[in-house]
Amino acid sequence: MKKRFIDLITLGCSKNLVDSERLIKMLETSGFDVRHNPENGKPGQIVIINTCGFIGDAKEESINTILEYVDAKNRGIVDKILVMGCLSQRYAEVLPQEIQEVDAWFGKFNLPDIVKFLTKTYPALSGYDRVITTGPHNAYLKISEGCNRFCSFCAIPLITGRHKSRPIEEIVAEVETLTSRGIKEFNIIAQDLSSYGTDLYGEKRLAELITKISNVSGVEWIRLHYAYPADFPFDVLPVIRNNPKVCKYLDIALQHISDPVLKNMRRHITGDETRRLLARIREEVPGIHLRTTLMVGFPGEGESEFRELVEFVKEAKFERMGAFAYCEEEDTYGAMNFSDLISDDVKQSRLDEIMSIQEEISLNHQLSKVGTLQKVIIDREEPENYVGRTQFDSPEVDPEVLIDKSQELKIGEFYDVEITEALPFELIGRLK
């Protein structure tokens, strides 16, 4: 039987990536040869695009990618185009009319239907088995889907629906499968980690879940992404502090600090409560590295509210911070109830200012590591260096450690590395 080739293009976040990994396994089990995000070469006979629909830039990237492959199809290079993911989930009625060259559109949750469209039968594989695309030693682990928060700027609940936790037993079984394949590092992801378990068990169970994952033989590092500040599960803090397999790292998106802006955003927390939350986290977990995301230009952010945000960035000294400018999303509470009156130029100026402040803060955090000994996992080999990360660095978004090639190192192994030099987004080290 002649092999059928598919290119699967994944756009957007790590949660999308997990969906793509599951689909790759289904497709390979059904006889297809799948390339994920190929960088060059002739496209496959079939192209599947896993889209993002979160913010304007992401939607634009998704549409442009679809149109790029439509052009390839019109030139006879590609036979079929299938589109899946958040964008097609959100605009299921509009997109098929607008881009008729696409052969089929699928939402975010009906992966087996894609295989059935191509083969006329559902895949034999089900559940959470997947092909790991992030390397031989680390993986993202999605523990829930959806969100009940309904922040006024966010379209995620409109796309993914209500918060739905996966059972603890199912997640632990997935971790056992992945460790048997050599995965050592697990980056725990969800739209809202803080709510994990509330729908299944009537209470928060994140601390219990993380403890049970850590008990699986072969797990070395666990890192937590996307906690929500309101109703924070404080019982997870002793787990981060005391469990040697849990990295002293927490990704918690705060968005803003000004009370009027937080109220307009429907974040269910005040500026003072946010400050107390951060103080408690740092007190209970000494040395923890906090990653956050902030937003500038949301309706209600006047000059005084922005100045409060600036002072907060200087005061909080986040080890890791990203920011973006507000972009109105149709059908959200914010779009329906507030006028977006802040110009794009003002938004960009504000964004540039706080990121400039953060760059200096980040450099100081990096410099504080010079002379320290860090446990580093090796991700890859480059012509001049080995490239790895510390427990404080998540893949793709955080700083890396460059180590000279005076000794041969193994990808996926841990080494003690002395940090000798620091740059804003890189550390330089040598094997101890």
Image (spheres, rainbow, N blue to C red):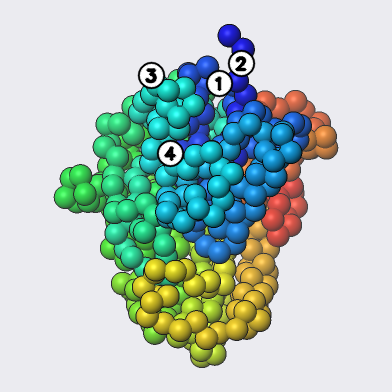
Tell me the quarter of the image containing the C terminus: top right
Report the disc number at residue 32.
1
Mark with earlier residue (1, 2):
2
Q: Please say if the residues under marks 1 and 3 sit with CB atoms less than 8 Å apart.
A: no
Disc 1 and disc 2: Cα gap in Å?
6 Å
Is there any visible trace of residue 86 in the rendered image? Answer: no
Residue that carries the numbered disc 4 in the rendered image: 141
Disc 4 and disc 2: Cα gap in Å?
31 Å
In terms of image quadrants, where is residue 110? top left
Mark with earlier residue (4, 2):
2
Q: Residue at x 42, y 65 (%)?
A: 154
Q: Nearer the viewer, residue 45 or 55?
A: 45
Residue that carries the numbered disc 2 in the rendered image: 3
In terms of image quadrants, where is residue 431? top right
The crowd level at tag 2 (other Cα within 10 Å; few <14, some 14-19, many 20+) is few
Mark with earlier residue (4, 3):
3
Disc 4 and disc 1: Cα gap in Å?
25 Å
Above or below for 127 versus 422: above
Q: Given the image, on which type of amino acid does mark 4 rest?
A: Leu
Disc 3 and disc 2: Cα gap in Å?
18 Å
Tell me the quarter of the image containing the N terminus: top right
Q: Please say if the residues under marks 1 and 2 sit with CB atoms less than 8 Å apart.
A: yes
Q: Given the image, on which type of amino acid does mark 1 rest?
A: Phe
